[in-house]
């Protein structure tokens, strides 16, 4: 089957998620109001769900009702926005429809009731950790005939996406040459001469070996090594890989040794671990919403301080999210303590 000629125009990153985009457009093109095949797009934080959702908005501007959520949904009023003749509803950040507390499924149930009787096609975006929880507790997957899990990227995909930003070349440096030991150095050798009790020190030249140094990266391999390292640290997450690139690049130069491989060391109590899981599951959550979920039993200020101080979360304008570079570490931790699955 040939490539859709509008493919590149619809997506900001036309070589990313090609298969997933084809599945979505096929469902939209085959839309049947009597039996709409609702779509759930599922991914970890930062993974690039917005690329697909924005593509739908650009491709079908006259057919789409757009409902983005930015905080916990507390009223059914959002359903009143689904009016008029448009037949596609695009909903971003649907994880805000549910919370892990008593009564936390009320808005989700209201949405699913509406979806169950609607003739419109719903294309929804979900955080993977919230989705897994709702799949186990509410069987949410039964409402969406088409489920799209965004795949991890590899270095061969990342490289053209990143390099397409630049009209000039990037210099990749695979070793820290100025910090290397000198080629020739002197060592002190102590000796005693016959008939003398006093020791003498004699400088002995030492030639540093250059062959077989496993830590050296040949300049020709630096570019490939850089993208391999970024993808490994990002654990295949496109948004995290972008963040690592932007953090490391200095002007038009990138040193492989400067790509931040953050050690994974987490020391939290049960309340702090719970808040970390909530932030992971909601991607970007306000202090107000966190306080409501935490309740009076958790000292929110102290817990957020410790999460921030350990380099696990960052705060911007009153909203907290997982620090991108720490995502893989956080995922491993909350899975290990069985707060997500």
Image (cartoon, rainbow, N blue to C red):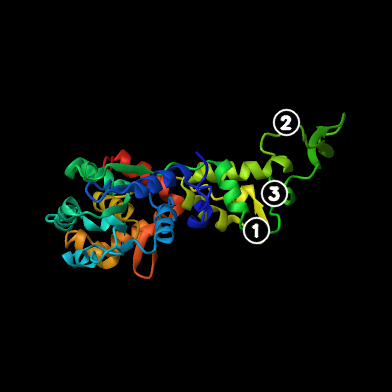
Image point (63%, 41%), residue name: 225
Q: Earlier in the sequence, mark 2 or mark 1?
A: 1
Relative to 13, residue 72 above or below: below
What secondary structure is marked by label 3?
A: strand
Classify 10 Å Cα crowding around label 3: few (below 14), some (14-19), many (20 and above): many
Query: Where does label 3 land, which residue?
Result: 173
Above or below residue 17? Residue 53 is below
Front of the two marks 2 and 1: 1
The residue under label 1 is 166
Question: Gap in Å between the C-alphas at discs 3 and 1?
Answer: 18 Å
The C terminus appears in which quarter of the rendering? top left
**Disc 3 versus disc 2: distance between alpha carbons?**
19 Å
Is 282 left, or right, of 243 in this rendering? left
Q: What residue is shown at x 26% (from left), y 48% (from top)?
A: 36
Which quadrant of the view contains residue 290?
bottom left
Find numbered disc 1 in the image and state the secondary structure of the residue it sits on: loop
N-terminal label among 3 and 1: 1
Q: Using the image as rendered, state which of residue 174 and residue 140 is in the foreground.
A: 140
Query: Is 225 rendered above or below residue 100?
Result: above
Proximity of marks 2 and 1: CB atoms separated by less than 8 Å: no
Q: Which residue is mark 2?
A: 212
Q: Nearer the viewer, mark 3 or mark 2?
A: 3
Q: Nearer the viewer, residue 91 or 211?
A: 91
Residue 325 placement, left or right of 100:
right
């Amino acid at each position: 089957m040939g490539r859709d000629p509008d493919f590149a125009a619809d997506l900001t990153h036309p070589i990313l998620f090609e298969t997933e985009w084809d599945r979505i457009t096929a469902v939209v093109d085959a839309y049947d109001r009597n039996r709409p095949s609702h779509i759930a797009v599922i991914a970890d934080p930062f993974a690039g769900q917005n690329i697909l959702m924005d593509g739908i908005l650009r491709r079908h501007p006259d057919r789409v009702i757009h409902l983005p959520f930015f905080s916990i949904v507390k009223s059914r009023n959002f359903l009143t926005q689904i009016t008029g003749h448009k037949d596609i509803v695009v909903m971003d950040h649907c994880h805000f429809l549910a919370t892990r507390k008593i009564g936390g499924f009320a808005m989700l149930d209201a949405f699913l009731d509406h979806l169950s009787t609607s003739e419109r096609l719903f294309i929804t975006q979900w955080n993977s950790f919230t989705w897994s929880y709702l799949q186990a507790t509410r069987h949410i997957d039964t409402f969406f005939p088409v489920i799209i899990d965004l795949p991890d990227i590899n270095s061969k995909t990342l490289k053209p996406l990143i390099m397409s930003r630049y009209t000039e070349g990037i210099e990749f440096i695979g070793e820290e040459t100025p910090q290397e030991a000198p080629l020739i150095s002197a060592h002190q050798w102590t000796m005693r001469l016959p008939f003398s009790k006093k020791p003498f020190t004699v400088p002995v030249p030492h030639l540093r070996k250059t062959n077989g140094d496993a830590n050296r990266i040949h300049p020709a391999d630096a570019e490939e090594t850089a993208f391999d390292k970024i993808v490994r640290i990002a654990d295949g997450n496109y948004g995290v890989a972008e963040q690592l690139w932007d953090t490391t690049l200095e002007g038009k130069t990138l040193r492989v040794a400067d790509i931040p491989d953050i050690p994974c060391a987490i020391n939290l109590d049960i309340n702090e671990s719970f808040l970390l899981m909530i932030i992971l599951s909601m991607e970007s959550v306000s202090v107000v919403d966190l306080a409501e979920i935490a309740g009076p039993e958790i000292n929110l200020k102290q817990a957020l301080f410790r999460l921030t101080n350990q380099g696990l979360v960052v705060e911007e304008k009153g909203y907290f999210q997982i620090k991108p570079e720490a995502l893989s570490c956080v995922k491993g931790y909350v899975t290990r303590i069985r707060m997500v699955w």
